Image (spheres, rainbow, N blue to C red):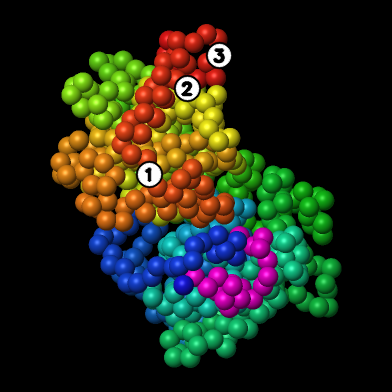
């Protein structure tokens, strides 16, 4: 059971529906799935960062190669500046003072999900590489390795996980400073609106008393607040006898300076860095600062916010792809005889032999089974390529309600006319959709003859969106599945699963439950009638006058 309120209360200790991870928890369903997972092979992401994703075994080999007699870990979710370097260098000095000969640092950028205004993973890693190359941190005693966990901004609770999980890869000490795993409350917070949700000291205080440390296998290197000393350009604890010589440079101030492309400060160093739009000497190596500034100059550019596998989809032979799959640049164009064709207009609705099998139609695969990237034929672009759908904020759209257990796509030469209305719901202005419930994934762009079994009528934001249910004619079960009744006999419970998917798939994005015109599918005959009607509407659209609805019609 997904006991959302209990999880939020225990983990966060805050009431703030604007908190990104609290909001994520409440958007979930009523149940959670858990259990053991067997890793069959190392996960690769093909995003240019895999060389920094080390297994614990690989990390132990790195420590041994550097001659480590102890390992201390420092987690990052921001670019490394002089304050972070101070913690890491001073942490190492403290360990040497304890008698260790060669403490090795595990620089551990968080690789999982982070909130949208955090610096993207690829920018952080690139900046970390720069500070190592310029010896802000000594590569002789530093191993950089991405840690795959997400950030949930759980403050004192989460920092215990941060420390304990690093033990699994060999860390005996964990560096912790102020406000670990913290963030500001949103405008929806009951208290601490636009202020730190957690007391800045609570994370390290709780960690010092945590069961994580009880077995003595891990210890802390703990720090209080530190400042930039204008007299010697170093980070350190404040000297109370000369407070005017110290500047506090918070993460938010650093981000603001980077957004302004701040340049090096002249002497004497001003106390108001934002007003002077400058960064003090030694705050960050110049190449690293340039990387951060370049990001803030174009924060909406193409970045890798967190670890997401970049994979090539299974694509049909009659297609040609450009751009990166999963990105808005992706386009899959259909070809025939060496020329581009439209999958909507140039492919035929009926395969050869329609007079023998009237329930057979051609199905164009847009989204293969088990794929979460939401793809669709683009009605406006020339030749109607398959492109990545996007959310209202312009980001690539993915299914989040599990993975589709069916192949999804369209019927060519069909159109749900918005002028055709029934019970107040009008056509959704798209080709007819198909849910193919065969036994395995089909390639994106494949044109596959299928048998029509029935349909479900989704009412999506007031529009009629028919979903034709079908099975490909060469599926191993096709011989015994001819309508919805035989489908249910062959695959018990699948009708209920299809209905659940259509009604619930948007709820994981925080939206409401979808509505169906009726809670049961149509007959095969009724579904064929819907196809015929939409085919006739397409013919009228294609042969019509000037009203093209902005579509590429290929005429």
Q: Secondary structure at mark 2?
A: loop
Q: Nearer the viewer, mark 3 or mark 1?
A: 1
Q: Residue at x 38, y 70 (%)?
A: 34
Front of the two marks 1 and 2: 1
Q: Nearer the viewer, residue 147 or 92?
A: 147
Relative depth, front residue between 410 and 421? 421
**Mark 1 and mark 2: span between their CA atoms?**
33 Å
Query: Which residue is at the front of the view, 168 or 282?
Result: 168
Classify residue 149 as left or right of residue 280.
Answer: left
Q: Which mark is residue 547?
A: 3
Disc 3/disc 1 C-alpha distance (Å): 33 Å
- Of callouts 3 and 1, the N-terminal one: 1
Q: Residue at 68% across / 49% down in the picture?
A: 258
How far apart are the alpha carbons under marks 3 and 2?
16 Å
Relative height, residue 350 to residue 47 (above, below): above
Please state the horizontal and vertical placement of residue 125, each as a whole percent of the image: 49, 54
Q: Earlier in the sequence, mark 1 or mark 2?
A: 2
Give coordinates of residue 398: x percent, y percent. Answer: 46, 46
Disc 3 secondary structure class: loop
- The crowd level at tag 3 (other Cα within 10 Å; few <14, some 14-19, many 20+) is few
- Magenta residues, as a range? 2-20
Mark nearest the camera among 3 and 2 is 3
Q: Between 294 and 290, which is closer to the camera in this rendering?
A: 294
| 345 versus 177 height, above or below | above
Can you identify the residue that label 1 sits on? Answer: 521
Q: Could you say whether the residue bearing mark 1 is in a helix, strand or loop? A: loop
Q: Is residue 510 above or below residue 441?
A: below
Residue 479: image location, x then y, percent: 15, 41
The residue to which callout 2 is attached is 381
Find residue 226 and report its image quarter. Answer: bottom right
Local crowd size for mark 1, using a 10 Å CA cut-off: few (<14), some (14–19), many (≥20):
many
């Amino acid at each position: 059971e997904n006991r959302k309120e209990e999880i939020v209360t225990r983990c966060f200790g805050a009431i703030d529906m604007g908190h990104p991870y609290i909001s994520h928890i409440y958007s979930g369903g009523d149940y959670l799935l858990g259990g053991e997972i067997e890793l069959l092979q190392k996960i690769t992401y093909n995003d240019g960062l895999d060389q920094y994703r080390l297994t614990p075994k690989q990390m132990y080999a790195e420590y041994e190669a550097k001659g480590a007699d102890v390992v201390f870990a420092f987690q990052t979710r921001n670019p490394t500046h002089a304050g972070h370097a101070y913690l890491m260098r001073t942490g190492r000095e403290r360990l040497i003072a304890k008698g260790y000969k060669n403490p090795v640092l595990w620089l551990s950028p968080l690789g999982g999900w982070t909130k949208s205004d955090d610096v993207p993973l690829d920018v952080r890693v690139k900046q970390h590489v720069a500070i190592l190359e310029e010896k802000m941190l000594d590569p002789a005693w530093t191993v950089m390795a991405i840690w795959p966990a997400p950030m949930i901004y759980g403050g004192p609770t989460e920092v215990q996980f941060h420390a304990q999980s690093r033990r699994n890869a060999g860390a005996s000490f964990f560096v912790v400073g102020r406000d670990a795993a913290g963030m500001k409350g949103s405008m929806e917070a009951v208290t601490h609106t636009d202020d730190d949700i957690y007391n800045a000291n609570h994370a390290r205080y709780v960690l010092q008393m945590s069961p994580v440390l009880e077995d003595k296998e891990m210890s802390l290197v703990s720090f209080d607040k530190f400042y930039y000393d204008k007299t010697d350009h170093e980070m350190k604890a404040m000297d109370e006898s000369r407070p005017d010589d110290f500047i506090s440079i918070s993460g938010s101030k650093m981000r603001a300076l980077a957004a302004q492309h701040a340049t090096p400060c002249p002497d004497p160093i001003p106390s108001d860095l934002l007003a002077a739009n400058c960064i003090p000497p030694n705050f960050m190596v110049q190449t690293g600062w340039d990387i951060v500034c370049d990001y803030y100059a174009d924060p909406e550019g193409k970045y890798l916010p967190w670890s997401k596998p970049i994979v090539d989809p299974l694509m049909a032979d009659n297609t040609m792809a450009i751009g990166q799959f999963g990105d808005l640049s992706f386009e899959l164009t259909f070809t025939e005889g060496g020329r581009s064709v439209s999958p909507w207009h140039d492919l035929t609705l009926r395969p050869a032999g329609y007079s023998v099998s009237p329930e057979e139609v051609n199905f164009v695969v847009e989204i293969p089974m088990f794929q979460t990237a939401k793809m669709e034929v683009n009605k406006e672009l020339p030749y109607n390529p398959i492109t990545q759908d996007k959310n209202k904020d312009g980001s690539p759209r993915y299914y989040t309600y599990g993975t589709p257990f069916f192949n999804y796509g369209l019927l060519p030469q069909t159109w749900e006319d918005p002028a055709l209305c029934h019970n107040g719901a009008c056509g959704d202005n798209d080709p007819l959709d198909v849910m193919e419930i065969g036994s395995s994934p089909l390639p994106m762009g494949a044109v596959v003859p299928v048998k029509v079994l029935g349909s479900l009528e989704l009412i999506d934001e007031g529009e009629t969106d028919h979903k034709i249910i079908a099975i490909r004619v060469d599926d191993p079960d096709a011989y015994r599945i001819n309508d919805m009744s035989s489908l249910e006999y062959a695959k018990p419970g699948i009708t209920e699963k299809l209905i659940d998917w259509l009604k619930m798939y948007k709820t994981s994005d925080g939206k409401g439950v979808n509505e169906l015109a009726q809670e049961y599918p149509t007959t095969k005959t009724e579904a064929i009638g819907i196809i015929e009607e939409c085919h006739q509407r397409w013919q009228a659209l294609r042969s019509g006058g000037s009203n093209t609805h902005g579509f590429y019609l290929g005429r």
